[in-house]
Structures are given as structure tokens and as C-alpha cells.
Image: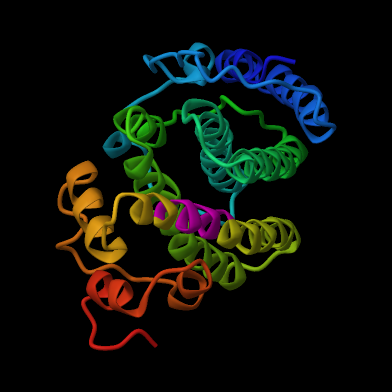
Amino acid sequence: MDYFLELETILLTDLPHLKIQRFRNFYENFLNNEFNMNENYVPIEHKNPSYNTFLNIIKPTKLPKINNFKSIDGKKYLIHTIMHIEYSAIDMALDAAYRFKNLPIKYYKDWLEVADDEIRHFLMLEDLLTQLGGKYGDFDVHKNLFEAMEKTQNDFLKRMAAVPRYLEANGLDQNPKIMEKLISNKDEFNDKILGVLKTILEEEVEHVRKGDVWFKYACEKQNLNPDETYLKIIEEVFPGSTTRKMDLNVSARKEAGFSCDELKFLSKRDNCN
């Protein structure tokens, strides 16, 4: 199996279940060491997200807010929104495993493992949406995560900082807030959603931690200070991100590798408790 060529095919696959099937075949071969890596392979440049053919993409500011946790339509929209994040995260993990060359094999194992987790998250959410009579594509979506992937496709250090250590870390902050609202709007189906979100939160900590490991690996290779470098990169990729006060899930971020100094700076607080 040609590792990079196969991953490219999976990345470009636009139908979710075909993408998942192709990934599972690929991943089985990878785990069985039935692959070769052509380090001269030239990766594609991103132009459109893989879901461009079946989802309606609009600006994030045009999307309605998630504020209805009681009605069927409100539950559908909540699940669909999280599903889209997880589907985008599948491609982000696949792209991380595909785009960057000459790294330790542990790096590729890590991001394929993340892709496998994200697929499982997507399918759990899809099952919930199906139970409500919905499907992926029923609501408009944004492509913020794809754009971050696009901006960092030529820089390994930036990718590790901007995607797992910024975007996915932000998910660690937002997930508990949604869970709180589900708890305050308790019903049998919201309990199901809550169970899935708990699983996602627990596993996403490890995904961010993997990004932390490889970000610091790249910093060490370039003799860079991780804290200073991280803040510089995220301000460059996401202007204004270092000046606003962030409401952080401190315990989850600590577990994922963030330093106390980073947490104090991002939260604009005097401590990281």
C-alpha cells in the first residue's frame, strides 16, 4: 500500500461513509505494517473542503446560535453542528498524517489514531441525528476549520499550534458549556447527547495532548521557546486571539500539556487554578 497516495484518495473522498470505509481499509493495512512511504511524494494543495459537494457552506456569522435545547429542531441543529466539527476533524487528522514528511513513525500513528477516534465520534452523533429523523447536510455549515488547515498546509510548526493546540483546545473549553445547558434542559434525549459529549471531551484531551507533543517536538528542533512561539503563531493565524480574555477549561488544558504561564496569559488571570 502506498501510504501517501492512499491517504490522498481518502482525503479527497467527498461522501462520508465511503471516506470512512476507505479509511478503515487503509488503517487496517497500516496497523499490519502493510504500507510503504514514498518521501518524494508531493502533497496536494487544498482548494475546497471535501464536503464542498454536499453541504451548503456559509459565513460563520450567518449561522444561527445554538440556544434551543428542548425542541426537536433545536436538538437536530445542536447535533448537526457538533457533527460538522467532528467531520472536519477527520480531515484535519488525515491531513496531518498525510502532509508532513520525514517525521517519526509515532507521529503518523498518533494522527491516524485521532482520525479513527473522530470517525467514531461522527458516527455516534450521526446515530443520534438519525433517531430524530435528520441527516448530515440538513443545516448550513461553515468552513473555519478547513481554512485553518489551508493556512498552515506548508508549515508543520504552525499546523501543530493552530489546529490541535488552538482550535481543538477551544473545543475543550466549549464542550462543558454545552453540557451544562443540556443538564439544565434535562430530558431523555438530551441525556443521550450528554453521554456522547462526555466521551468526546475525554478523548479530545488526548488529541490536544498529541498536538502539544508534536508542537514541542518542532520547537525543540528549531530551538524555539514553546510558550512564546505558540502565542506568536496563533496571533498570526487568528488575529486578535491573544488579546481577548478566554474562558478556559483549565484542568483539561493542563492535562493536554498547556503551561501555567500560557493559561494565565490566555485567560488574563493571575493564576492558573
Looking at the picture, the colour scheme in use is rainbow
| Residue beneath the point at 59% across and 35% down | 90
Report the side of 130 relative to 224 (left or right): right
Q: Nearer the viewer, residue 107 or 125?
A: 107
Tell me the quarter of the image containing the C terminus: bottom left
Task: Locate residue 25 relative to residue 19 in the image: left or right.
Answer: right
- Relative to 126, is 262 above or below? below
**Along the viewing direction, whichever of 231 and 204 lies nearer the viewer:** 231
x and y percentages locating residue 195 in the rendered image? 72, 61
Does residue 64 show up magenta in the picture? no
Vertical relation: 137 (above or below) 112: above
Q: Where 86 sits versus 267, above or below?
A: above
On the question of residue 67 being in view, the answer is no
Q: Classify 178 as above or below 207.
A: below
Q: Residue at x 65, y 58 (%)?
A: 203
Given residues 106 and 97, the one toward you in this image is 106
Residue 229, by quadrant, is bottom left
The prevailing secondary structure element of the residues shown in magenta is helix
* Residue at left offset 41%, top offset 46%: 160
Residue 232 in picture, x, y percent from top left: 19, 54
Residue sitting at x 16%, y 47% = 239
Seen from the viewer's position, the closer of residues 161 and 92 is 161
Locate the N terminus and report the quarter of the image it occupies: top right
- Stretch of the chain drawn in magenta: 207-215
Q: Is residue 211 magenta?
A: yes
Count of numbered badges drawn on the protein: 0
Q: Position of residue 206 (x, y in %)?
A: 60, 59
